[in-house]
Image (cartoon, rainbow, N blue to C red):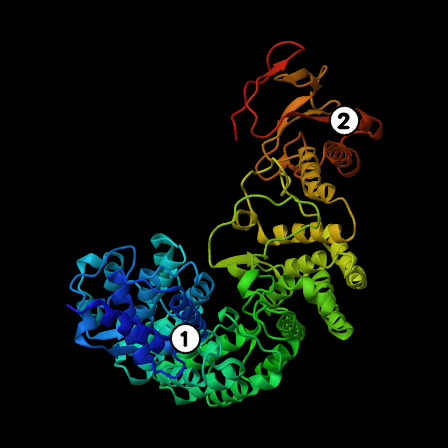
Amino acid sequence: MTCEPIRIEVTRRAIEVLTSEQQVNQLVTQAAIFIRSQVKFHLELDSEQRKQVVSHLADFLSKAADTPTRSLAEYLVPRALWDFAAPLTPLGHFGEATEPRVNNFVAVLNLIDVANLQETLSSPLSKFHEAFRETPLHGKDSLRNALRHPQNFSWATVTKGPGKSLLYPRVVYLQSGFLIGKNATELFARFDERLPADIAKEVDGALDQLEFGTDQEQASAINVLIEFMPERYLSRAATLVENYFSKQIHALPTSAALELLNRATGDDFIASYVRVLESSSDDNRIKLLRVANFSKIEGFSCSDPEKLEPLLRWCDQAIGQSDSINNQETASILWMLYSLLFETTRTSVTCQERVIDHLEAYEHLGSDYWLVRRLDMDGEGRFGLPMRLAILKKAIAELKNTSDDPESNDCQALAVIISGVESIPELSSPQQNALIDELRNRLDAAAKNPSVYSEIESLSSRYKMGEPRFGDVDILEGDSRESDEKPTNVIVLVLNLLIDLSNDSTSELVEIAKPEITALHHAIEERNVTFSKPLFGRNVWPKVGWESLIARLSKGELVFHVWYLQTGALLGKDVQLLNQRPTDLYQAEVERKLRLVSPGDTLAVKIPGLLPQTGDPPILQAGTAAPVTGIPVTVSDDGTIQLPLIDPLPVKGLDLQQVTEAISKTYVVEQEILRSDSAHAISVNFLVRAGQAVEVLNLSGSSVATKPEKR
């Protein structure tokens, strides 16, 4: 056993080494371990030694805090010091602690612990601890269990096990934390956090895998980069990600690939994306185009149109080589360009206008491209104002191209314009006037030839605007059947659009069309459309909507009535009263027809000296009707009546006054059977109407008739 004086002398020299500015780290580490070993044997430092050690360790900790991970080192120490290599924590001691390699920070912290220097060194220890807290410590692995339960593990085994790159940073973090009074729960919670240093470590490892790994490792690395890589991380990252996506993007979430490429390349994103497209296979290129929804690429923005030029030139070339917009690549390109024009995409107005300039230069893009989307969509699918205006101009041009063709189906163009009505005030005055001129032309043509323009057309159900509207008056109610196509009418859509334009900002446009609106209203009014019940309205034919009405009614009459209501609304008339007019006309016609003689009617006819030949004519009562005077005469199927001494007399369609006059004319003027002074005594009344089955009584005496057979 070493004698006491020798141990004291060696300790003194170890303190000199520990506190010397010239000694290398390995000797300092060995000195710290030796002093710790002697303190274990209750060797106490005198005040001067303690002061020297504290001063040096404070400086050591402060310098180490500036570059924590770079100051970590591991040294071989003599066999006699192996038992003191393992770290000390309140959680226990590692079993079989022998290990020839010693970490410099572990050695120093062990010394601070056993020498009870933590309170004196609290400030540099706290700084040191916080520095290590910011180093990469995140991870879920077996190493955590060893650190929490050290008595169950050999330190030699732990230092040779997996996760060694995290071993010493974690150990030093835990030791320093315990020394400044933190608890185990708080300290171990840090291993579940991902701080910037943790992310940087994971990203660097993923980039290594992406550059040198197998296909499986590269796929795993890409997922790590997608989740964690910050923006503009390293130029190396941009090159590696770009090269990878040139080969494959399968098994990645939608837009995730381009989000990563955008983060990696920053301002060079568009150019990088084009390079990937140019170097990709056909299949991979189509995948890249399909996921290129720029409105969903987090962090993407473009305010400089020149940044878009590489992509637009590539699109020009690709589409220029295609003879159809329906092939996969062209359709994907157009969708990708679409996404640059969404309201939610962070592209400036000038950038959107540049994209639209290129789209308009593609000659084979017709109405099946420009007029397929509604302009009033909400959220991600809504176009920005530049594209909405461009589509409105295309729709107006489409109306102009078909203006002279009454059989053309303008419904789609009109529906698109209606869906973008809120953007019409942003059109130039010439464009607004061109639109109103086309609407006026169609109204004028419909007023002159209503039947030609009353056809029911089909409109895609996605527009949801084919049903007629009547301004602020809600009189159309009922079902809306689920189908891909919805029925509508061109003039209904024209009037819908004018009704939508009747607000403060565009009402002057409607005023321009008032003459044509008035002419169409009067033209339909003159047609005297009739319905047995009010066509629209509350509590009338409940749950009957536009499509059901079209299915069950005369389409022409239905469309005319709708025009009548819509034009009335535009002219400021009471639409509810207009809606009642066809029913009023119908009732008037019914009443008029009731006044006319029809086959099967039985008339009570009185002709002096003929009906009856002698005596007074009977007084007859049919059912509960008022009594009438005369002889019963039935109107035959051919609409005539047989009277004495004359040929059958046509009476069908005449009212009673006209029948009386016809009898008088025949007997007095034409046949000269009666004198003129007898004409005033001729009378004709309805006794029984066709189809009635009632008992006729002779109130003057016996019955002269029974219940007629029902015709």
Towards the viewer: 477 or 230 = 230
Identify the residue at image location x=37%, y=70%: 136
Is 520 above or below relative to 77? Answer: above
- Image quarter where the N terminus lies is bottom left
Q: Nearer the viewer, residue 376 or 340?
A: 340
Q: Is residue 44 above or below residue 587?
A: below
Q: Residue 579 in the image: x percent, y percent?
A: 69, 43
Identify the residue under disc 1: 257
Rendered location of residue 590, percent (x, y): 66, 36
Q: Which residue is mark 2?
A: 682
Q: Earlier in the sequence, mark 1 or mark 2?
A: 1
Which is nearer the eye, 597 or 223? 223
Q: What residue is shown at x 71% (from left), y 24% (from top)?
A: 610
- In the displayed structure, would residue 616 be above or below residue 130? above
Determine whether the residue tagged by mark 2 lies in a helix, strand or loop.
Answer: loop
User: Does the rendering let one see residue 158?
Assistant: yes
Placement of 689 over or under 321, stated as above or below = above
Label 1 with label 2: CB-CB less than 8 Å: no
Question: Which percent across, then down, holds residue 19?
Answer: 38, 75
